[in-house]
Structure formats: structure tokens, C-alpha cells
Amino acid sequence: MDLSNLKPAEGSTKTCKRIGRGQGSGRGGTSTRGHKGAKSRSGYSKKVGFEGGQMPLQRRVPKFGFKNINRKEYKAINVDVLQALAEKNSITIIDRDVLMAAGMASKNDNIKILGHGIITAKLEVKAHAFSKSAIAAIEAVEGTVVKL
């Protein structure tokens, strides 16, 4: 076998329909476009969303919702995750660098600590935001909360 006798698998390729190449081709004349009308002519293009005069879908459906331009996105991390991380790496200070090293946050993420789960280690936690329950849980075990 060599490059000269390679060919595609049986039935994997189709020949394209050659249109407008004379009467002998069987597709000359109107070239499969029918007779007269805008669609038969060169340069025809239908407006996007046009439904033949019927009220288009994007005008029938009511507008709703909005995007708040002042919204801040946070990467949410629970206190039980911090507990597991502290036990695994035997650390007492948890900040962005520690969470990045663990693969829980990226350098552009704003981090918010949430209060789900149980925490027993005394930790110093540094993050951009904290929920009330997270602050209560961390401070209940003599930990400290630092907002960045």
C-alpha cells in the first residue's frame, strides 16, 4: 500500500450537485430555483427573522429581565472545605494563595466563605466576603476573619 492507491471509505463521500452548467447536465435553465420571483434572482437575501409578514417570534415574545452591571461574582467555599484543607496540609492561615494551590480558586476570583459544615480548627481566614454564619462558625472556635 502507498499514497497512490489510497481512497476514502465506501459511501463516506458524495459528489456535489453541479448547478447551472448547461442543459446537458440536467440542472441548467432555472438551475433548481424554479421560475421568476425574488428567490430565483442573484443577490437575493432574506431578512434575518423575517416570517413572510407574520409578526416575528422575537417581537411576539415579551421582553424580560436585565443584567446588573454592578454585580460581583464570588467563588463560594464552605467552612467544612476549609477544615478539610487545614487538616490535609496542617496549616492555620488560609488565604487566596493557599486556595489557588489547592485548585479551589483562580487568581482573578473573588472568594466568599459560606457557613455550611462544621469547623473545629482555629484558623485565620482571609477572603473578600463572608456570610454571617461563616463568621459565627470561625469565631466560635477562636479563629479570625480578615476581609481583603
Image: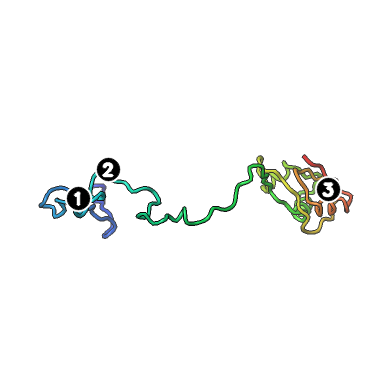
Q: How many marks?
A: 3
Q: Classify 10 Å Cα crowding around label 1: few (below 14), some (14-19), many (20 and above).
A: some
Residue position for label 1: 19
Q: Is disc 3 placed on a helix, strand or loop?
A: loop
Query: Given the image, on which type of amino acid does mark 3 rest?
Result: Leu
Residue 57, image x and y in percent? 45, 56
Please name whichever residue, 48 or 113, is drawn nearer the observer in this view of the structure.
Answer: 48
**Residue flagged by tag 2: what amino acid is it?**
Gly
Q: In terms of depth relative to the viewer, which is nearer, 78 or 123? A: 78
Q: Quadrant of the C terminus?
A: top right
In the rendered structure, the answer to whether residue 64 lies left or right of residue 97 reads: left
| Residue at image coords 84%, 54% | 137
Secondary structure of residue under mark 2: loop
Q: Please tell me whether mark 1 sits on a helix, a strand or a loop.
A: loop
Report the coloring of the rendering.
rainbow
The residue located at (83%, 45%) in the rendering is: 145
User: Residue type at mark 1?
Assistant: Ile
Q: Residues within 10 Å of mark 3 (few under 14, many from 20)?
A: many
Residue 11 percent across, percent down from the top left: 27, 60
Q: Is residue 129 left or right of residue 24?
A: right
Which badge, 1 or 2, is on the more N-terminal residue?
Answer: 1
Q: Which residue is mark 2?
A: 43
**Closer to us: mark 1 or mark 3?**
1
User: What residue is shown with label 3?
Assistant: 123
Tag 3 and tag 2, C-beta contact below 8 Å? no
Front label number (3 vs 2): 2
Distance from label 1 to label 2 (Cα)?
A: 17 Å
Q: How far is mark 3 from mark 2, CA to CA?
A: 70 Å
Q: Position of residue 80 (x, y in %)?
A: 77, 56
